[in-house]
Image (spheres, coloured by chain):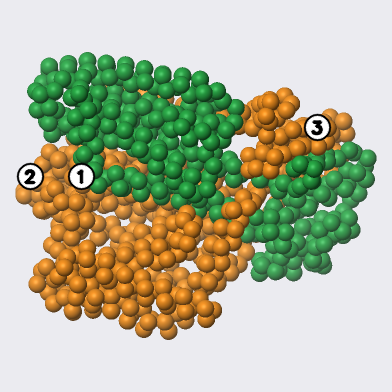
Chain colours: A orange, B green
Amino acid sequence: MIMLRIALIEIKARKRWSKRFLLMLMLLSVITTTIAIHSILSGIKVDYGIYSSNLDLDSPLFVRSENPDIVICNDRVMVSGNLKSLSAFDEFRNYIRAIYNQWIYDKFGSSAFPVLIRVVRVPTKVEFREITVKDVKRIVEIAKEEKKQGKEIKPKKITPKVVKKIEGKKIKTERSEFLTPDELKPPSLLSKLIYAFGFIIPIYFVIQVYSSSTVEDKMKRRLELLFVAEDEWMVLFGKMMPYLISSIVLGLVTMAALGKNITGIIFLIPIILFLLSLSTFTAMISRSYKEMTFLTIIISIFITVYLFIPAIFTAIPMSKISPITLLLMFFEDGKIDIREYVISSIQFYVMSAVLFTLSLNSLEVMHAQANPIEKVITITTGVMKRYWIVFLASLLSIPFVFVIEFFTLSIIFMVEHAFAAVILLVAVIEEFFKGLFIYSAFKNGLNPYLSAILSASGFLIGEKILLFTFIPARFIEYIPIPLVAHMLSAMIFVLTMRFGFKQALVASATFHAIYDEVILWNFSRLL
Amino acid sequence: MEFLKIALRDLRSIKREKTIIIVLCLLFFVASFSSLVVVGLTLLYSPTGYSKAKIGLVGDAPIFSSIVHPIRYDSLKSALEDLVNGEIDALVVFNENTSGTNYITVYLPKEDIKAIKATLYLRKKLMEYQDVLRKLRGIPTLNLKVYEGFREIEVPEGYSLHFRFIYVMLIPLLAITTAIIISAFLIDSICEEVEIKTLDVLLSAVEIDDVIAGKILATLLLAMSLTVFWIFMLMLNGIAIYNPALVLLISISVSLMMSAIALVISVFMLNREKSQLVFSIVVISIIMLMFSNPSSPIALLVRVSANSNYTPIEVFVYLGSSLMIVVSSLLVAKKRLNKSIGLGL
């Protein structure tokens, strides 16, 4: 009942928005939608005039210049060999091909197009192969090599008017799906993403209103009053409810509008819950609006990447880690694999529950001026009161660790010789979480050594559960090695803990990194 | 001089909260992730990758076979089985017809990544095949030769993707991210002062002009340092940014324009929740308009950073007009704030 009341208060708070403001919002949404449609129809035009040639071409991409990127002379084109010049030639080739197609069609009719293609897509077996360190290193090396040479190719979109004409005049009646070889394009990975964005963007707006409202309640000390009067979880959940419901409704409406099966909402629910509890948590720990905004921007970008990037690489089993991948697959074949759904969504449910619990315990740090990390330590200290909680916390931290580690991988490609840096970063992240629980337990008067053992084993078990869902069981034989590593680094943390959290983190992470480096290096030599 | 103090005060609060580190991490992440994408695309579309695609054929096609050297199958069933098991990368089904149109059915893997390799290879070969058939029919074929100096070279199809990714996507994206970050910062810094009532205290000591000008100055300095940071980062990553000074000026103009809009919105809403919501809706329209307009500042940014067709005058026109927009937004903000303070809001 109380929950409902708070939900109603929250809705009423939105009613405080004057009619004028609501009218303006509606007007703005209409204008934005109109502009969006206009822009999508007219396409990207910022590339106009990026290339130059010695002749006047009837293409907006090219301008005439004294010092051109390409020099056209009869059937020869001269290039200077740099990236821009070669790219200019590539786009010029597309342009000239379109003109040529038009010309031969006008002159010879449909007999000028002797090859027409129909594409049928067949689901094939996805090979499962364990990726070893050596593989990763090799891929990085190849990639860097290729990057230096600047070689990569992808057919650019060209739509010869001719083919449309053929379709219109003659062929369409019987075989409308046929393409000329020029038109045979590899699947565009980006278009899939844009499509999936359509489901998430409206939800982001709801979340934004929610997080603003929460942080405002906090700043104006309304939350405290409510917390004193009612159960904390009812207050927070009641506050979330209207946003949860409206996000779900928005998701359903978007799916229905795009003519999709609305059962797909089950893939969005874990994401919505996660975003809501994440916003609650950031609202609780941030010191000011500015900090809140920055935290929200960076976290939403991270989460977006984590959700969407796997959806591109559907050929890899790992891609099923994201509910978005499964959502897109569901729209294609209409099937839901319960096991896959559980695997991909459970991490989001776990993270939501954890963040929600932490938010409930953040009352005392809500207005403190400590930095977010100090606040997190204070909050976990409030929770780590029993040994089993240490174990469970460590186990449940795995999804967070995994999400963060996902991003450190991208650094490999950014910096030369980043492999060592990534190993170090991964070590710092893992030790941070393990140490956090040991430190908090210790502050509560629990035995640090026992906590260290519990934290290390909880972490290891969580890690393995996650890995085994993707990697075959024969890896089980390697368990003793990482167990020793986790235990030892946890012990180092305990021993250095009296110098402070940061110092202990540095010590244990250094050990962890060196250990990983030695093990991986030896492994990669063996393989 | 008061406005300088206000600006420094705002910047200090970012420094104190270490939020600037988060912002720099964000830009670093955007840039490093994009290079990950570039590397990914490079691997996927590399010519060495697609030259190895194995093509299966069901049917009778001698000319086609002489070009592609496919693996022959007698039945569609066994060929499809091999495709599913990954023995071949694509399957082509047709009987060659040298005088009429050849309707070819191509079976490709449904998984995108696998399909790309096969599609690129097949496209190239089918275009060769099309040219051979055209020659047989006496239709002239398109034969473009490309020379670097006096040496004939080959430019892979779709070579321009890399170039486009850097100059048409990545650099505009970084400039826009910067503009959005500093606008959100401005909205927060104004609404926070209003909502926790520090603005009243501030105004008892400082003129309202100085407060607003100080806040704009802080955002300007922030925008400058962020832009310098990402330009430097891209250069470090081996990406050639031409005319970095002009790129900096355009990026600042975009940031100034957006922060002027943010300023006007926030003084009218005087509430973070409403301001952020309105601003994010408005910003989507602005981004869309800028990308679909060939004379927008973003289009200029693309041309300047890629050293294409531009004149420095254009850059200064945008800078000048963005300054004018900022000044007029300052006037509007002043008037509005005076009024709302008069009303005791």
Quarter location, residue B161: top right
Q: Is residue A38 visible?
A: no
Q: Nearer the viewer, residue B35 or A206?
A: B35
Q: Residues within 10 Å of mark 3 (few under 14, many from 20)?
A: few
- Residue A224 vs A25, above or below: the answer is below
**Helix, strand or loop at mark 2:** helix
Name the residue carrying label 1: B16
Quick check: A366 above or below A402?
above
Label ID, residue A73: 3
Which residue type carries mark 3?
Cys
Give the chain of mark 2: A
**Disc with the residue nearer the chain's start (2 vs 3):** 3
Residue A7 at x, y percent in the picture: 19, 43
| Three-letter code, disc 1 | Arg
Q: Which mark is residue A261?
A: none
A125 or B338, nearer to the observer: B338
Dot 3 falls on a residue whose secondary structure is: strand
The N terminus of chain B sits in image quarter: top left
Q: Residue at x 16, y 68 (%)?
A: A499
Using residue A200 as the reference point, say whether residue A191 is left or right of it.
right
Q: Nearer the viewer, residue B235 or A339?
A: B235
For label 1, count other residues whose C-alpha is less than 10 Å away and answer few (under 14), some (14-19) or many (20+).
few
Check disc 2 and give the amino acid type.
Leu
Which image quarter: residue B78? bottom right
